[in-house]
Image (tube, grey):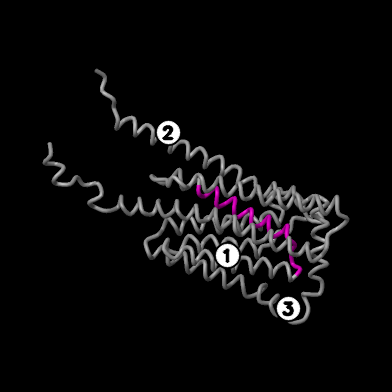
């Protein structure tokens, strides 16, 4: 009679499942990397430019008066505060023994910010999506979204829901402040956010390759994040086509509300994707700490006596 190798069959099944999740992650990472380009092409259309003009009309004059103080705070105070805060978190992670979390946070934060700045300066090819045929993404949004990722990764799993909520409110506040300050329009904000989302998805695929363990939910989170992006993009596209074609022009107040909602939706998608990266990095840290214990690989005395 043939004896079924149940253990071997389970191991092969587990290996196939892991390979399938890894392949899904690679596809998600590639699709995520294409998000900024897709967003740039979307916002290069004439309906998107009509949307931008309507938003500028809606916030016209807001840069004067009392709002001028907030503009100065966003411009001059937020960069050093964010930079010092992120650096302090990275140092605390390293000193606390969470080096892999620090590496992931530093790579994603620096990569997203540098990518946005490189596109703005013309070092990376990108569609000229603005009305003036430039690609002036918001560096402040790139900075704030990068800091958001670092915060979510840095807080402990138990406190992560609260940390994510607080960091999300700060990120959305930065987006709304930039809109009201007339520095950038919705396109500059959303595209900068998609750059950070792309880095998060690529980083998650890299962690899955490097880490000896991979949570089962990691691949599904990436696919769901892309689905949310697709739904948000479809909504924005429908809004642009409807108001740019069937309805003559945008109402400024509605255009501003749509720009705010687009910023919030982008932040929500970024948060969901970042939580997936955080779970993968947590598993990586846990596996590395377990492997580093002296008794993790040493056979138990009772096991040696069994044979």
**Residue, far top:** 1
53 or 142, which lies in front?
A: 53
The count of marks equals 3
| Label 3: how many Cα within 10 Å (few below 14, some 14–19, many 20+) | some
Q: Earlier in the sequence, mark 2 or mark 1?
A: 2
Query: Whole-Å distance between the Cαs marked 2 and 1?
Result: 37 Å
Q: Nearer the viewer, residue 24 or 68?
A: 24
- Residue under circle 2? 16
Q: Secondary structure at mark 1?
A: helix
Image coords of residue 268 (percent x, y): 59, 58
Within 10 Å of disc 1 (Cα), the crowding (few <14, some 14-19, many 20+) is many
* Residue placed most toward the observer, 257 or 287: 257
Residue 250, placed above or below residue 4: below
Kindly report which numbered mark, 1 or 3, lies closer to the viewer in this rendering: 1
Residue sitting at x 52%, y 42%:
25
Q: Which image quarter holds the N terminus?
A: top left
The residue depicted at 70 percent of the width and 63 percent of the height is 260
Mark 3 — residue? 67
Please state the horizontal and vertical placement of residue 227, each as a whole percent of the image.
61, 46
> What are the residue bounds of the magenta stretch?
182-204
Asked if the residue under mark 3 is in contact with the one under mark 2, i.e. CB atoms within 8 Å, the reply is no
Point out which mark residue 168 bears. Answer: 1
| First reached walking from the N terminus: tag 1 or tag 3 | 3
Left or right of 276 in this view: 125 = right
Whether tag 1 and tag 3 are in contact, CB under 8 A, the answer is: no
Q: Which is nearer the N-term, disc 2 or disc 3?
A: 2
In the rendered image, which quarter is residue 303 located in? top left
The disc at residue 2 is none
For the point 41% across and 63% down, the residue is 158
């Amino acid at each position: 009679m043939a004896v079924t190798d149940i253990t071997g069959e389970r191991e092969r099944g587990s290996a196939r499942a892991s390979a399938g999740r890894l392949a899904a992650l690679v596809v998600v990472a590639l699709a995520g990397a294409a998000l900024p380009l897709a967003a740039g092409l979307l916002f290069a259309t004439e309906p998107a430019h009509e949307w931008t003009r309507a938003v500028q009309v809606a916030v016209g004059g807001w840069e004067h008066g009392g709002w001028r103080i907030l503009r100065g705070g966003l411009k001059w105070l937020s960069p050093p505060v964010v930079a010092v805060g992120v650096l302090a978190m990275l140092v605390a992670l390293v000193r606390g023994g969470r080096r892999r979390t620090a590496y992931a946070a530093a790579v994603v934060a620096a990569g997203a910010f540098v990518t946005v700045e490189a596109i703005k300066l013309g070092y990376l090819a990108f569609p000229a999506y603005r009305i003036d045929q430039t690609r002036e993404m918001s560096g402040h949004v790139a900075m704030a979204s990068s800091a958001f990722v670092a915060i979510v990764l840095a807080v402990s799993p138990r406190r992560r829901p609260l940390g994510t909520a607080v960091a999300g409110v700060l990120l959305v506040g930065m987006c709304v402040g930039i809109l009201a300050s007339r520095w950038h329009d919705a396109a500059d904000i959303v595209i900068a956010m998609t750059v950070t989302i792309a880095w998060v998805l690529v980083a998650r695929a890299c962690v899955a390759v490097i880490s000896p363990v991979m949570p089962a939910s990691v691949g599904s989170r990436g696919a769901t994040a892309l689905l949310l992006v697709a739904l948000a993009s479809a909504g924005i596209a429908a809004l642009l086509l409807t108001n740019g074609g069937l309805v003559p022009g945008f109402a400024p107040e509605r255009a501003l509300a749509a720009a705010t909602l687009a910023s919030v939706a982008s932040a929500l998608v970024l948060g969901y994707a970042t939580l997936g990266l955080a779970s993968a990095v947590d598993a990586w840290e846990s596996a590395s700490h377990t492997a580093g214990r002296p008794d993790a690989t040493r056979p138990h005395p009772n096991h040696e006596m069994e044979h």
